[in-house]
Image (cartoon, rainbow, N blue to C red):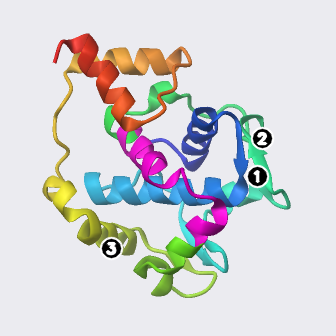
Amino acid sequence: MVNVFDVASYILRAVGGEISTMKLQKLCYYAQAWHLARQGKPLFQEDFLRWEDGPVCRELFNVHRGRFAIMEGDIPKGYASAAQFTEEELYEIHAAMENYGKYGGAELSKMTHAEDPWKNSVRNEVITKEEIKNYYFDRWGEDCDDGEPELILTHEDIERSLKEAENGKIYESAEELLRDLHGHAGI
């Protein structure tokens, strides 16, 4: 299983290297939410806490404490590369980036404040993965196919995608990833 630093590093590479720490926190949160709702299991094990500015992962916060922006090089070395992500994980990360990446950190914080996982949790306490999963499954349920991922790619497609990720290929969107894979698969 990947960790929050793997997801954060991937997001930083995908957006061009630097974003606000608040935005990175919220994109990691929404990637976790998409994965919980659509796959029925966590993308990573680290938890999010209910802080004043919305959900925050303490482990990631410890890396960027006191900074407004963070770059890929600020994530500790020695963590997994994108090649260790599954096709489903990459898809959910891109889905989160595509749907929420256009917003700034403050806007994303306001969005999380309007959602039940943050509203129903206690300040400085863990927002449970079960709460996140249930809320976003109910919200995005029609897209979740009862929690079962739709098999839209062949094993060869996935292998090629992971090889490209290992070689530094970063997709701008989930659609671009699927178009590229389907184009190579002749679908």
First in residue order: circle 3 vs circle 1: 1
Q: CA distance from mark 3 to mark 1?
A: 29 Å
User: Does residue 106 belong to the magenta stretch?
Assistant: yes
Kind of residue at badge 1: Val
- At horizontal 56% and vertical 28% (from top left) the residue drawn is 81
Which label was assigned to residue 63?
1
- At horizontal 45% and vertical 16% (from top left) the residue drawn is 164
Label 3 neighbour load within 10 Å: few <14, some 14-19, many 20+: some
The residue wearing badge 2 is 74
First in residue order: circle 1 vs circle 2: 1
Nearer the observer, 59 or 50: 50
Kind of residue at badge 3: Tyr
Q: Do the numbered discs 1 and 2 sit on residues whose CB atoms are within 8 Å?
A: yes
Q: Secondary structure at mark 2?
A: helix
Which label was assigned to residue 131?
none
Magenta-highlighted residues: 90-109
- At horizontal 71% and vertical 36% (from top left) the residue drawn is 72
Q: Secondary structure at mark 1?
A: helix
